[in-house]
Image (cartoon, rainbow, N blue to C red):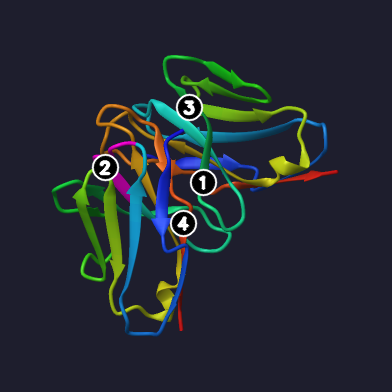
Amino acid sequence: GAVVSQHPSWVICKSGTSVKIECRSLDFQATTMFWYRQFPKQSLMLMATSNEGSKATYEQGVEKDKFLINHASLTLSTLTVTSAHPEDSSFYICSARTGLITDTQYFGPGTRLTVL
Amino acid sequence: GENVEQHPSTLSVQEGDSAVIKCTYSDSASNYFPWYKQELGKGPQLIIDIRSNVGEKKDQRIAVTLNKTAKHFSLHITETQPEDSAVYFCAASLISGNTPLVFGKGTRLSVIA
């Protein structure tokens, strides 16, 4: 299957700082990427849909000014958690679709964010 | 919008036995149903998917069945092995580039050796 990478795999930061997470599709072009957040022992919660060259679409309740998403190329989307607080600590996972009219969605390995 | 219910939330089976996880969906327009396996600390891994034009799909020890009329689909794992232990998520969506997957709440499968 297609490969999606994330960097970093884990990050610890101080409260008030910003953290950037990268999501890359390694062997295919992804016009659409998705960002999810997952708390322990819970399901994946969609945060936003990221389209190359346009603004991301955020789910209800997700602050777009706090979670900045940039999908600058067909292989890279970034999520920046601005002014992070302890409640932002979570497992962040991106996924990418392999094409406009196909449905298969592949996930990255996730990024564990801990805000002290 | 779409809502996906998944049962059971936890499942323990003896090694070699079969495991079945069931999901129901609410939106009759949904036509794509993948299953993901997630191990601790890792991202979900696609293990099998089915589209609404077929009723069953099999890949070695894993099979998925779909009942469009009843709006439910199931994952079947035969001859379970300890390495099958993980959390399994079902999902549903439309076949469309921008349509996100809607996930069930997950099933924690434990295969006891």
Q: Tag 1: residue type?
A: Pro
Please determine whether, in this image, residue A40 is positioned above or below residue A87: above
Q: Tag 3: residue type?
A: Lys
Q: Residues within 10 Å of mark 4 (few under 14, many from 20)?
A: many
SS class, disc 3: loop
Are dots 1 and 2 on a single chain?
no
* In front of the other: A13 or B34: A13
Residue B49 coordinates in the image, percent (x, y): 49, 28
Name the residue at the top extreme. Answer: B54
SS class, disc 2: strand
Name the residue at the left extreme. Answer: A54
Between circles 3 and 1, the one closer to the viewer is 1
Please determine whether, in this image, residue B41 is positioned above or below residue B112: below
Q: Residue at x 46, y 53 (%)?
A: A44
Per the model, the C-alpha gap separating discs 3 and 1 is 24 Å
Where residue B19 sits, quadrant-wise, is top right
Q: Which mark is residue A110?
A: 4
Which residue lies under the disc numbered 2?
A: A32
